[in-house]
Amino acid sequence: MKRLFFAIALTLTALLAGQANAQQKTIVETAVAAGSFETLVAAVKAAGLVDTLNGHTEFTVFAPTDAAFEHVDHETLQALLQPENKDQLTSILTYHVVPGRVNARDAYSLNSAPTVNGQQLPLNFRGEALQVGEATITTTDIQCSNGVIHVIDAVLMPGQDSIPAVAKSAGQFNTLLAAVGAADLGEVLSGPGPFTVFAPTDQAFANLPEGTVENLLKPENKQQLIDLLKYHVVSGRVYDNDAVKARRASTLLGRGVDIELDAGGLMVNDARVVAKNIDASNGVVHVIDSVLIPSAMNGRHVMTLLEETIARGAPVFNAGQHDRCAEMYMEALDSIMASGIEHADDHTMKLVSDTLDRARRTHSMPDRAWALRDGIRNLYVRLQDMPENMPAQIRTSRQ
């Protein structure tokens, strides 16, 4: 009998909850009914986000009032509402939206929250005045059928400059920017990304041995410079808390950096992070106090790189893009030549350099691709014969 009453009680509770949710308005409907979010609603309409915020997916919205929008420059606001600026407006609005339903009580222990924009929103729910970014929350936990609204007294602005622009405005990354320019990576780091950049300061570059930077900037050392810079870049947005959990991040160079938290703060290899979580429109920047130097590749890593390069290059060649295939093979061997191979003898490295020289003298793109392919195969076989690259059982049997 008790079980029956308990089951009936649960059923009634579920029915009442369903009726309550049915009576609740969506996020947009709630904002319209309130009458104090007219500018926000107009912006949501201009950005084409009405259907999203009226749908079944739950969101948490930090909603600026009309009074909050009055603090935004009038001309800037009107420009944002124009069709040609829809992407920028969407970026700003989605910076006010967090996936899922996050009530004030749930946010108490959080320092930040990931937004639909992709950038993180700083939270401080512990003081007398609840803060989100630079805004104060004036009303919390307005429940909607598809989420919750917290009312704020200011419009939140995400990072809107690209990574190179953020670095330039900071004024302490002149050497890094010169290196990015010399490596022709400026367009990449200004692209959509997103990227995470561990950015050495000018002083970090100055601490390198005398003449290092000058040599890296020479045209003949371009590949070495590219590899060095790629070793400072990780694909995606990796904030400090995510980095600490992961403990290791794979760079665009294909090699990982170690991340740990010690008494002095966050470390990336032997570099200390002196400023973290600087948002850009296409990623995040962490400032470090020394330059990350990639060590020579070990043989197993080189073999994996060669396998992946052939796997990517073969279908490109078969599709008739011989120049692109040759370029992919050349990039891999250039990277190996610039980094070196642990325990490799002079003959092994000469094999790499001879292959590159022969390819550069070959003007037919199909022939160039095959010359590079032959060199890659010969290098792979040579690396297989190095004792440290053999499987353990074979290595043991030869001893």
Image (cartoon, grey):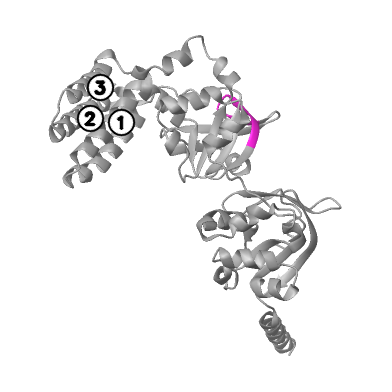
Type of the residue with mark 2: Ile
Residue under pointer 1: 332
Compared with 21, 165 (above or below) is above
Residue under pointer 2: 376
Per the image, label 3 sits on a secondary structure element best described as: helix
Quadrant housing the N terminus: bottom right
Marks 1 and 3, the one that precedes in the sequence: 1
Q: Quadrant for residue 334, please give it.
A: top left
Q: Quadrant for residue 218, please give it.
A: top left
Quadrant housing the C terminus: top left
Compared with 38, 338 (above or below) is above
**Residue in front for this viewpoint, 390 or 272:** 272
Type of the residue with mark 3: Val
Residue under pointer 3: 352
**Residue in front for this viewpoint, 67 or 366:** 67
Q: Are marks 1 and 2 in contact (CB under 8 Å)?
A: yes
Q: Residue furthest front?
A: 75
The percent position of residue 27, horizontal first and vertical second, equals: 66, 71
Residue at image point 26% right, 34% down: 327
Mark 3 Cα within 10 Å, few/some/many (few <14, many 20+)? Answer: many
The percent position of residue 333, horizontal first and vertical second, equals: 28, 27
Compared with 15, 65 (above or below) is above
Instruction: Let me know if residue 275 is in the magenta part.
Output: yes
Q: Which residues are magenta?
A: 266-276
Q: Are marks 3 and 2 in contact (CB under 8 Å)?
A: no
Per the image, label 1 sits on a secondary structure element best described as: helix
Q: Is residue 16 left or right of residue 358?
A: right
Residue at image point 61% right, 25% down: 172
Mark 1 Cα within 10 Å, few/some/many (few <14, many 20+)? Answer: some
Q: CA distance from mark 3 to mark 2?
A: 8 Å
